[in-house]
Image (cartoon, grey):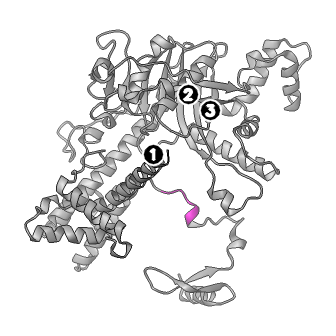
Amino acid sequence: MPQEHEDQFEWFMSSKENINLSSYKIHTKTGLPLKYLTFLNRLRNGPFVYQEDLGGLCSTCSTYGYDVFEDLSNLIIQNITDPHTSECGDCNRIFDLFTELRSLFGNEHDTTLKELQEMLEYYLAHLTRKGYLNNQFNANLLQLDNNSVLIIVDFKMRILPRRIRETKQDFYAKRGWALHTVLIYSKNQENKELEIQAFDYWSNDNKQDAWFTASSFDATFNLLDPKPKWVIIMSDNGPHYRCSETMALISKWPEWYNIKCKKWCFLEAGEAKTSIDSHHAQISHAIKRYVRLGFDLNSGEDIEKVLNGLSGTSTAYLKPNRQVRNQSNVKTIPGISNWFEWSWPTEGLFAGYVCARDLPDFGEIKKFSPSKFIKTELLQPEPAVVSNTNNWDLRRWSIEKLNKELTSRNIFFDAKMGRNELMNLLKQEMYEDSRFIEDYNDDFLKMDIDNDQIFHLSCGWALKCNQKYGKKGSGKRLAKKVVATLTQFFMIGQRDPSNRYSAKDMLDGLKEMVENNELTAEAIPSLKTIENWITRFSSQSKKEHAEQFLEQDL
């Protein structure tokens, strides 16, 4: 940038006509007062986008990708002062980069570089699984026939009551409703095109667990006509989906609904972006529009009014029957979070087993006998369902209703048309935006790969079971003596708030015990672990005190 432009920019950003300085807030890095810009309103409708409005990173990309490169840059800047007079092409290769850095640093920073390389490899594995799993959507669509459907399920963030005017007290007192969406892709038996049907279930039961998921499937299967013979399911890897109870309940589907679940594909954590997210965005937009028109969202029935205008959507109230559920019936399947494809074969060598693989159509099949992790007989969910809309099923519409809908959409039709012709004409309009057009071409690009070519990563490096990071329950557990000491520190602060221990105070106390040979250095947890323990223990303590108070009151 020319010096003249820099001077003009500096003058503009220093003028009080454009900038207001905060009188009490300062920037954390520079220590200078924060500046408030007075010209952002003029940029609002222009081509400029404010940085915080951009999409964020998932936790894995942020921690194991971008943070690693930032640490590497800081390490190089702090320890390498020699001038870099030439550009090295090999530095673009990440593994050669680490080799070069080790030769420059020596053994002083070998542990740090090894840790950074392992974290970066975990990040690369995360991206590899993400790309492979996201492509399973199109691959699963190509497997559909007239006897099958593809199902995508997801919970929307809790819907809160909304009013056109509300106080702050009203806002923080909200409880809201749960909304679970079942999105179904099926093939039209006449024209072989794909159709989409959305089932949205709202409920006062806000427990997002396996039983609520099973109840949603139960309600959906009873509404489908005709029922499919087999289904493929896709979802994120939330604990309400990828859990032992869900695997056990699905094994009973052939008996309960005469429907076989061919497989369930789970998407990578933090990267589960499917068409169901677009559907939820439509719901959010419909709610905002409903409130702006002057209506209040005070009950679940109002949700049905909001969603009544969404084509291809059926809305219903769902009340899970939790009296017949017994969560203790199912044991946890060890290593369940490592596998992204689950299946329930009814024929062949694995018939009757619950099977799992590292990735869809990849890896060794691991089988689990339901009798090993199901203690007693499972009962069908059979929730209470009250459905007021059935817009998607045009087969139930009368000719008068079809004529009225076509007229409202300004679609020309002949008065002599029959019911099937009117229905197909309306379908063409309703599902035009939802059709899937895929030119499948099996002429793949072929690459000549030298068998003697050296690759730095071993076979299976991207599989979740081979990762060092990101595993649930893989961390070191706190020793009993450490837990007892932390509990004592916590209770001292509860008795006397002026003597309350922070996480750092607790860590210093544990280190002092190591110096007195009361604990080993290996048993000392990190500061982050202690902070997490305080959060869990505080919540548990409050719950126990509340239960004791209620028992005494009774």
Q: Name the kind of residue labelled 1 in the image.
A: Glu
Q: Is residue 514 left or right of residue 497?
A: left
- CA gap, disc 2 to disc 3? 7 Å
Residue furthest to the right: 415
- CA gap, disc 2 to disc 1? 35 Å
Q: Name the kind of residue labelled 3 in the image.
A: Tyr
x 69%, y 38%: residue: 300
Q: Is residue 545 left or right of residue 300?
A: left
Vertical relation: 526 (above or below) 508: above
What residue is pinned by disc 3? 201
Q: Earlier in the sequence, mark 3 or mark 1?
A: 3
What residue is pinned by disc 1? 551
Q: Residues within 10 Å of mark 2 (few under 14, many from 20)?
A: many
Vertical relation: 510 (above or below) 344: below
Q: Earlier in the sequence, mark 2 or mark 3?
A: 3
- Percent position (x, y) of residue 23? 58, 88
Q: Is residue 152 left or right of residue 237?
A: right
- Say if the magenta span includes residue 353: no
Q: Nearer the viewer, residue 474 or 58?
A: 474
Secondary structure type for disc 3:
strand
- CA gap, disc 3 to disc 1? 35 Å
Q: Quadrant of residue 169?
A: bottom right
Vertical relation: 218 (above or below) 22: above
What residue is pinned by disc 2? 216
Q: Name the kind of residue labelled 2 in the image.
A: Ser
Secondary structure type for disc 2:
helix
